[in-house]
Amino acid sequence: MAFRLAQISDTHLSPRVPAFSANFSILADHLRGLRPDLVVNTGDLSLNGADDAADLVLARTAHDGLGLDWLAVPGNHDLGDDPLPKCRQPANAERLARWRAQIGPDLFLRDVPGWRLIGLNSQITATELPEAEAQIEALARALEGAAGRAVAIFLHKPLCEERMDETGVTYWCVQHAPRQRIFDLLSRHRPAFVANGHVHQWRDRGVSEGLRQIWAPSAAFIVGDAYQAVVGEKQLGYVEHLLHADGTFESRLVTLPGLMRHDIGEMPELYGPQKRLAA
Ligand SMILES: [Fe+2]
Ligand SMILES: [Fe+2]
């Protein structure tokens, strides 16, 4: 029997936004009926946990309310971000401590039949925090210790948009220097797949540069075409991964009737006006 893992992402929960809690309720009802073996949220559990602990508290309560085994890695809205130009909420020790106090560890390692599941914190990879270096060392140990298990990696941001040697500084992906270090480790110990969120688009394009990268959609909102290029599919839902003990797997997008397709571009009260794409 396959291990059923539900990868949810970008739930953006807050007491201030009942509309996103309503979408989470539909997802939660579905998961409670399905009873997957594990739920993994790949980040942005909260609307603004980076500055407001109340959002993390609600996210924690909502996930505990699933009555299911669950794990999470932080997103930029939970923990802040790599110190990019104009970054309003840099990931720092205070924000990391808040995440850990309200949600738990920012990394995970879980062995299930035939598989090793590794959760990474993509939000600190380009910071000077000692946890950034410790994370690389922990990843190396986790890969070396997989002992024949298939490996799946979970993190908030995609490693890259198209190619691992991209050098552009971008809000959307892990930055170039830490990406190269992670990719170097993954090149020596190939994971079966790397799963992320953050882009709010579903994408599974098969193997590129030896890595299968699976992008989970948000369960809360999409970013409308006026504000974000289409690089995958702008769906709402989650990803189901069926992990077989022999290391094979199937991953698929699950859409749910009833999820309201909110466009963050039309909700400037939450994150401010979104920048329109050039016509
Ligand atoms: Fe998000
Ligand atoms: Fe994000």
Image (cartoon, helix red, strand yellow):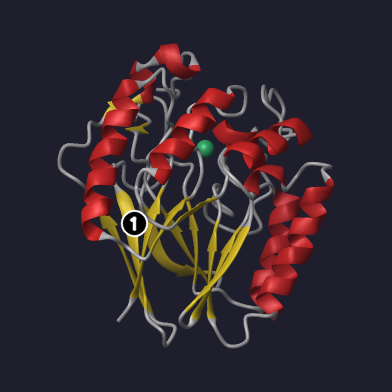
Q: What residue did someone put label 1 on?
A: 239
Front residue of this view, candidates 194 and 207: 194
**Disc 1 on helix, strand or loop?**
strand
Q: In this view, does 254 lie to the left or right of 139?
A: left
Q: Residues within 10 Å of mark 1 (few under 14, many from 20)?
A: many
The image position of residue 44, as x and y in percent, is 50, 38
Q: Which amino acid does label 1 sit on?
A: Val
The image position of residue 236, as x and y in percent, is 29, 42
The image position of residue 8, as x and y in percent, is 39, 49
Q: Which residue is drawn at 78% across and 50% down?
A: 131
- Tally of numbered tags: 1
Please determine whether, in this image, residue 271 is positioned above or below residue 221. Answer: above
Q: In which quarter of the image is the N terminus?
A: bottom left
Q: Residue at x 43, y 11 (%)?
A: 269
Q: Quadrant of the C terminus?
A: top left
Front residue of this view, candidates 227 and 66: 66
Ligand 1 within 8 A of label 1's CB? no
Residue 170, can we see it?
Answer: no
Q: Residue at x 65, y 74 (%)?
A: 187
Q: Residue at x 51, y 44 (%)?
A: 43
